[in-house]
Image (tube, grey):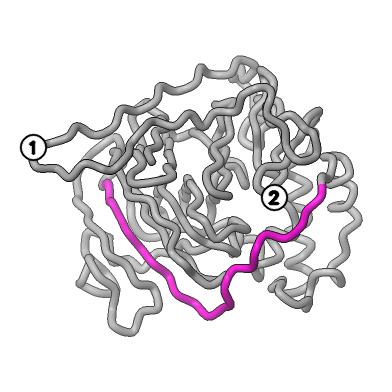
Amino acid sequence: MRYLRPMLSLAFAIALGGQADAAEEYKFVPFQQFLSATRDAKASDFVGKQNLRVKDDASFQEMRDHILSLYEGVTVKHSFVEDGRHVDCVPFEQQPSLRGGKGTDHSKQPSPAQRASPPATKKGDTQPRSAKSLDLTLSRGKRDRFGNEMFCAKGTVPLRRVTIDDIARFRTLSDFLRAGKWDDGSLDRDGRIHGNRLNPDDTSTHYYARGFQFVDNFGGDAWLNVWSPTVATSEMSLSQLWVVGSEGDGKQTVEAGWQVYPDKWSSDKAALFIFYTTKNYSDGCYNVECSGFVQVQTMCISVKGSIITARRTLRSGASISNGSATRTGIGGSFTRVQATT
């Protein structure tokens, strides 16, 4: 795929909804118990229920089938809970994008990526009151409140568990997989829909500011400030880097950054994400919620309630911080993690 333009974008989306609820009490659910409950789940328990938005029985069936397909043939021997979310240690080759693959040896897991260096300080720059590099990798010895070690053994990767409760906050499976993503055509070369590429129309409910350029390239990277703005459960706020190729129905993107979206992440804190589409947002997904991205790190990034585990395929990567800046990169051959406070 030939990438045509990188875009650094700060975008906000506003919708009606109440404020995010405080974290609810939770319990540890073993992986096999989770699968059994998913198979036995009924549409009547989700369609038309308060705080859930499942469109109809057929939409529920699609949601349940998707989850079961994600974990078909997966053998999980260890799980733990981080900030209220289950994390399963999945064998590297049993990830959604690698299961059933032919012609490629997926038995060997790539080496972890190198950590990025902070941006160089220029004369006159204001220095942060404190800045240090944070090690966000999992390590042996730390346990969750249920006594489970928060660590995945060699040969496995930590994947955040996807549940029906997660998807049922959206009307359809497609709404969940591509939540907050759509194309208004404003960044096509001919600027279709409206000519103002930097700001939305006055009638828009999607407010944003962005910068862009049209160049032949192999990706890009940037340092993004990270915040956790207050939004309603159905609202979204993000800052991200885009690399976009082609236009119209064949538009392809790889995106990385942070997003505050309580409905999507079950948290009111900023969550690191990566996203892709190959058909102008009619396909694709975040992280490893469908086939597409491959996680290569035996690590789990968890900052202030935000948990992200996905890494790269299509040569993409991203990072998150608990403070002033985070380095986000797409393309080339790097996947980097850098955090500052």
* Mark 2 in CB contact with mark 1 (< 8 angstroms): no
- The answer to whether residue 77 is left or right of residue 227 is right
Q: Position of residue 128 (x, y in %)?
A: 26, 43
Q: Which residue is mark 1?
A: 123
- The answer to whether residue 312 is left or right of residue 66 is left
Q: Position of residue 326 (x, y in %)?
A: 36, 41
Say if 193 sits above or below 310 in the image. Answer: below
Which secondary structure class fits the magenta region best? Answer: loop
Say if 174 sits above or below 116 in the image. Answer: below
Element at badge 1? loop
**Residue in the image at 57% along x and 63% along y:** 262
Front residue (pair 130, 309): 130
Front residue (pair 170, 29): 29
Q: Amino acid at mark 2?
A: Gly
Magenta stretch: includes residue 237: no
Front residue (pair 290, 115): 115
- The answer to whether residue 3 is left or right of residue 314 is left
Q: Position of residue 205 (x, y in %)?
A: 40, 78
Q: Amino acid at mark 1?
A: Lys
**Residue in the image at 70% along x and 39% along y:** 87
Front residue (pair 66, 326): 326
Magenta stretch: includes residue 9: yes
User: Would you identify the image quadrant in which residue 152 lies?
Assistant: top right
